[in-house]
């Protein structure tokens, strides 16, 4: 949306005198925000995306007893393209996190991420494990954290209400998705799996650390010579079968 | 006949559909089926028929006494005018040792002379690691750590809010008595019995020796025993291990001191 | 189905020695057959025999064909770093005769760990050998597709080797010294240079080759153009998962299709690999109990029981009577709650979208209420302790006295929901059309593929550990082993209904015992937080979980506070070995239902 940049949304626009009676001067955002937020908060469609134990509680929340339909949230969509909310319901592993980031990138804006349970927030009891990501917020922006292991359905609904409150306080004038200067903003680099998980935003840091620690094995050193460092935008070499 | 199975199945859904309305009629004269505590209790139990939905923010499903969510620390009820009561925790470290994901950090207090002081200076629980297993509460010998019932912890930030420090964790005894009245009462009785047994044993054991009076003057435990009145508070129980340790270590220390003095001489 | 498997082999039958257990007898005969390659296990507390690596397939074949030990339950690796050896441990059972296992230990040099693969003899070893390769680097010669299974291709090192350290490594064993008495709180990521749970080999630089990690998955698929006349269509390889509504979690099926027909199917897992075993070896014995809840998170108490039995075996503990009844009570209720869930999802996969699931949830929620009142948590029960259980029955559940609540459930509500399920689904024409004849698994295959639980019994093999090697008080209880003979999806649906009915039968018998033993002790000794193994050695405990045979293999050294090796034989994981063979030749839509009929839980598949 380009209007945001002209100031029309916030109302501070200088209007020539001769047009003063022909235009509406006011804060459009203030007028539209309640409508926008009301419709958004009552139709947050989560993605049908269960990771671990918390997913069971998430399904319980959606089913007979807790009935997410009361919040307009019962429409669990299997595809990210139709979803507004990604509930990270369980342990995020290194093997899974590339998929999660890719799914997030596929979600249309406005989109929200809820980190459900201890594992998604900070690794949980499995934090010390070698295959566990210590918090999805290392890769994605999280809107609401719901602690617990697992959070009970009521705790999850509590988190969803917190999300609704957050939506209530958003404004189309300031929401990041309506005044994007950079079209790639909001697209997060998908981490890749090397000898360990590689966050592409940390490539420089990885090189620095590698320089600090010498290679013990000359054979491995020969193999570890950089050929062509991967680019953030570079497409994967292999074409995945669809 | 082909199709009877499907018709029969549809009959089941129809029965479910009607059941709720039948139940509505049953409760019509008694304040209605929804937003009614009595009807709610029945609806959520084995006696319930039809839709059992909990209208969460308005109606909350009560949690049982044993329910375990993130732990908290029990303190005495704060005296009037003060914010915090006395900690029950003696920083013995059993909870930190038994915690499966190791989410408890305890900084034990120190006396001016460097000896450990049986109360925590700091107590942290990282609720991003805690698995709500309840071992800390189960193995705590002083009933000082309990599992909370407050599950409504959702927030927008974890870096500041998800490591609970001592101030955040401490809750007065009255809170525990409120959320788990039966267990709190049973524990209170257990403590009183233990206390009674201990006093009895002590009076049998002590006799003319009465060794606590001969403890070093700077010993805080002995000092407190003379100062604090003998009330039915469970802090008393915490003294005995300290005394037993002193009993062993005081002579040892004297011995070492003696050896040291002879060697330097 | 093949009847030959069910009949005891004629050669062994007349020679049984009544004084020996089947396993002892088999070992004695094995020693006579192979005196040169088999030696006695001399280590303290170990059972079974040590087999010379090169002769392993021969010995296994003999056990399978001549001695009736035709079921390879568990394969795992052990790192004996002190002796510079890696060990593979095999547990074989006799389907026909029941009883304990024949344990084979194979030891190889740690530097060059080569063991002949058992896949040609027991196809059920396929995934387990891959896992042992992934975790320990044991190379199984002759394995058809020896790739990493839980981590990814290109992962650095073999994480369960004792000299491998994770990025957040603090100490070899818990409790960590940094927690008390000088506990200054920190987040583990603050201590790594990357601020994340990652580490890279010394001097490693990103090269861009990391993107190729996936190609091996597709190379593993076997398909070729057929020469039969007719329309030639292209083969298409489709990824289902890891995010797919039909895969019950983060599970991936790589399917090769000819039109809509499945030609080959490879399960890809590890998307929920939470390092259960590695964390378990850092943990003390008691710390593992709440972690077991998170294996098969739909049946927490049942997982607890398996672990408690194993440790009780290792420690030589006994359990008071009331605790045993309480254990059976929780485990059978968990079985019902799990099957209600599984059937809801199976029917969901078959197209009965949500309705049966929602009806089943109503009763499951009430069961969950009971668990919440009993143990304090809806799913993560953490209920068993070594030598007993943690809590006695609560006074009331949802305002109703506990025993009355149980009676309501057992006599009224649960039978009603089963009958309702019959009305709703069992005779539904669409369900029958979809489920009958799809996903066939013969009895011989079911055994050879090491499947367990309902999957095995739906193929006509009446093998239930509660009867074959009774634990707890199951030998005092009257129930039938549910068995169905057609080995298709429909029978797997029916057998779960049957099992729930049998569980109700058990529960009915429990209630008088629970009344009678009210107030009796529920645990032998007061539980200790710092338990130490009174003896060294190994223990393998297994229970009939709702998903199948859940086994725990634990080894410990004397006076140690933590297990040396802690392995979980996860039924969902091994049952998936049968997924490819079951799906081949059926339509892609069937493969979804076939997966649903196995009833997997990813927490257990990937651990």
Image: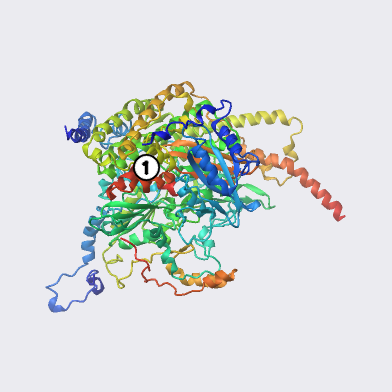
Rendered location of residue A232, percent (x, y): 39, 71
Residue highlighted by disc 1: C599
Rendered location of residue C320, percent (x, y): 54, 27
* SS at badge 1: loop
Quadrant placement of the N terminus of chain A: bottom left
Q: How many marks?
A: 1
Left or right of C370: which side holds C569?
Answer: right
Q: Nearer the viewer, residue C479 or C283?
A: C479
Rendered location of residue C498, percent (x, y): 35, 31
Rendered location of residue C410, percent (x, y): 36, 27
Q: Nearer the viewer, residue C517 or B163?
A: C517
Above or below: residue A189 compared with residue A133: below
Where, by quadrant of the figure, is residue C537 drawn? top right
> Can the viewer see residue C358 in this picture?
yes
> Can the viewer see residue B126 in this picture?
no
Above or below: residue A225 compared with residue B158: below
Q: Residue at x 54, y 28 (%)?
A: C15
Chain letter of the residue beneath label 1 in the structure image: C
């Amino acid at each position: 949306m380009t209007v945001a940049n002209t100031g029309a949304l916030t109302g501070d626009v200088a209007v020539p005198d001769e047009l003063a009676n022909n235009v509406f001067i006011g804060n459009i955002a203030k007028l539209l925000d309640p409508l926008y937020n009301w419709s958004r908060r009552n139709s947050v469609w989560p993605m049908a995306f269960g990771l671990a134990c918390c997913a069971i509680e998430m399904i319980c929340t959606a089913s007979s007893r807790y009935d997410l339909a009361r919040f307009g949230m019962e429409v669990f969509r299997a595809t990210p393209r139709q979803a507004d909310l990604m509930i990270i319901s369980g342990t995020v592993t290194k093997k899974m996190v590339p998929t999660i980031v890719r799914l997030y990138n596929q979600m249309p804006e406005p989109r929200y991420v809820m980190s459900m349970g201890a594992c998604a927030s900070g690794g949980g009891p499995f934090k010390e494990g070698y295959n566990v990501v210590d918090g999805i917020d290392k890769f994605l922006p999280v809107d609401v954290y719901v602690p617990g292991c697992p959070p009970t359905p009521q705790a999850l609904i509590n988190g969803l209400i917190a999300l609704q409150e957050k939506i209530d306080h958003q404004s189309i004038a300031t929401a990041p998705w309506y005044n994007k200067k950079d079209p790639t903003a909001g697209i997060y680099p998908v981490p890749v799996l090397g000898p360990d998980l590689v966050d592409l935003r940390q490539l420089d840091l990885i090189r620095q650390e590698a320089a600090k620690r010498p290679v013990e094995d000359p054979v491995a050193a020969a193999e570890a010579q950089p050929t062509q460092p991967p680019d953030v935008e570079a497409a994967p070499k292999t074409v995945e079968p669809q | 006949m082909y199709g009877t199975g499907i018709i029969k199945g549809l009959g089941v859904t129809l029965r479910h559909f009607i059941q709720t309305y039948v139940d509505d009629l049953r409760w019509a004269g008694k304040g209605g089926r929804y937003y009614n505590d009595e009807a709610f209790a029945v609806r959520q139990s084995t006696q319930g028929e039809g839709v059992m939905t909990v209208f969460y923010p308005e109606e909350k499903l009560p949690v049982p006494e044993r329910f375990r969510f993130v732990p908290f620390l029990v303190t005495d009820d704060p005296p009037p005018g003060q914010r915090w009561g006395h900690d029950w925790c003696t920083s013995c470290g059993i909870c930190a040792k038994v915690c499966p994901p190791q989410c408890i950090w305890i900084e034990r207090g120190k006396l001016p002379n460097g000896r450990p002081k049986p109360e925590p200076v700091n107590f942290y629980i990282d609720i991003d690691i805690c698995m709500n297993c309840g071992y800390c509460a189960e193995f705590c010998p002083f009933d000082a750590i309990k599992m909370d019932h407050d599950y409504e912890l959702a927030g927008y930030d974890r870096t500041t809010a998800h490591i609970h420090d001592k101030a955040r964790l401490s809750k007065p005894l009255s809170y525990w008595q409120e959320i788990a009245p039966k267990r709190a009462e049973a524990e209170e009785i257990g403590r009183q019995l233990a206390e009674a047994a201990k006093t009895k044993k002590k009076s049998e054991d002590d006799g003319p020796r009465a060794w606590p009076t001969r403890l070093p003057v700077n010993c805080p435990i002995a000092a407190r025993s003379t100062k604090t009145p003998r009330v039915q508070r469970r802090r008393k129980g915490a003294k005995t291990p300290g005394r037993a340790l002193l009993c062993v270590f005081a002579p040892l220390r004297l011995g070492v001191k003696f050896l040291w003095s002879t060697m330097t001489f | 189905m093949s009847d030959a498997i069910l009949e005891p082999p004629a050669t062994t039958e007349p020679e049984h020695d009544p004084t020996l257990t089947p396993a002892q007898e088999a070992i004695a005969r094995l020693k006579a057959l192979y005196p040169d390659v088999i030696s006695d296990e001399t280590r303290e507390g170990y059972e079974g025999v040590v087999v010379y690596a090169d002769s392993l397939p021969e010995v296994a074949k003999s056990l399978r064909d001549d001695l009736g030990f035709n079921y390879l339950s568990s394969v795992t690796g052990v790192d004996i770093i002190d002796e510079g050896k890696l060990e593979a441990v095999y547990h074989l059972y006799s389907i026909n005769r029941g009883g304990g296992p024949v344990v084979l230990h194979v030891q190889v040099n740690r530097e060059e760990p080569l063991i002949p693969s058992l896949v040609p003899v027991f196809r059920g070893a396929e995934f387990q050998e891959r896992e042992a390769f992934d975790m320990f680097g044991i190379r199984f010669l002759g394995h058809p597709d020896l790739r990493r299974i839980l981590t990814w291709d290109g992962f650095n090192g073999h994480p369960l080797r004792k000299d491998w350290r994770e990025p957040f490594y603090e100490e070899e064993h818990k409790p960590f010294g940094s927690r008390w008495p000088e506990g200054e709180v920190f987040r583990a990521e603050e201590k790594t240079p990357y601020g994340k749970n990652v580490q890279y080999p010394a001097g490693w630089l990103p090269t861009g080759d990391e993107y190729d990690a996936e190609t091996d998955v597709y190379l593993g698929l076997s398909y070729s153009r057929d020469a039969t006349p007719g329309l030639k269509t292209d083969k298409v390889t489709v990824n289902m998962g890891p995010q797919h509504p039909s895969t019950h979690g983060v599970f991936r099926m790589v399917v090769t299709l000819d039109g809509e027909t499945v030609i080959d199917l490879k399960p890809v897992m590890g998307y929920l690999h939470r390092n259960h075993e590695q964390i378990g070896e850092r943990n003390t014995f008691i710390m593992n109990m709440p972690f077991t809840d998170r294996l098969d998170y739909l049946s927490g108490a049942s997982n607890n029981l398996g672990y408690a039995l194993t440790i009780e075996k290792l420690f030589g503990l006994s359990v008071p009577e009331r605790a045993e009844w309480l254990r059976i009570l929780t485990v059978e209720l968990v079985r019902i709650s799990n099957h209600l869930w599984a059937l809801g999802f199976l029917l969901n996969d078959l197209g009965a979208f949500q309705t049966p699931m929602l009806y089943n949830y109503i009763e499951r929620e009430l069961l969950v209420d009971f668990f919440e009142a009993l143990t304090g948590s809806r799913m993560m029960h953490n209920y068993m302790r070594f030598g007993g259980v943690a809590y006695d029955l609560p006074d009331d559940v949802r305002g109703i006295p506990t025993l009355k609540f149980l009676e309501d459930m057992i006599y009224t509500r649960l039978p009603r929901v089963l009958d309702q399920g019959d009305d709703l689904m069992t005779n539904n024409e669409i369900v029958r059309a979809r489920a009958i004849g799809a996903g066939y698994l013969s009895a011989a295959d079911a055994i050879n593929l090491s499947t367990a639980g309902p999957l095995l019994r739906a193929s006509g093999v009446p093998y239930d550990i509660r009867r074959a090697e009774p634990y707890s008080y199951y030998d005092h209880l009257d129930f039938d082993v549910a068995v169905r003979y057609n080995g298709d999806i429909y029978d797997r649906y029916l057998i779960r209904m049957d099992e729930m009915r049998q569980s109700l039968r058990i529960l009915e018998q429990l209630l008088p015992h629970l009344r009678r033993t009210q107030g009796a002790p529920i645990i032998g000794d007061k539980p200790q937080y710092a338990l130490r193994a009174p003896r060294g050695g190994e223990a393998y405990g297994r229970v009939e979980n709702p998903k199948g045979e859940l086994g725990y293999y634990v080894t410990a050294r004397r006076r140690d506070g933590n297990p040396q090796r802690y392995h979980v034989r996860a039924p969902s994981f091994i049952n998936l070995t049968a997924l490819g063979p079951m799906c081949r030749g059926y339509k892609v839509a069937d493969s979804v239902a076939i997966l649903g009929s196995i009833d997997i839980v990813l927490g257990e598949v990937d651990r």
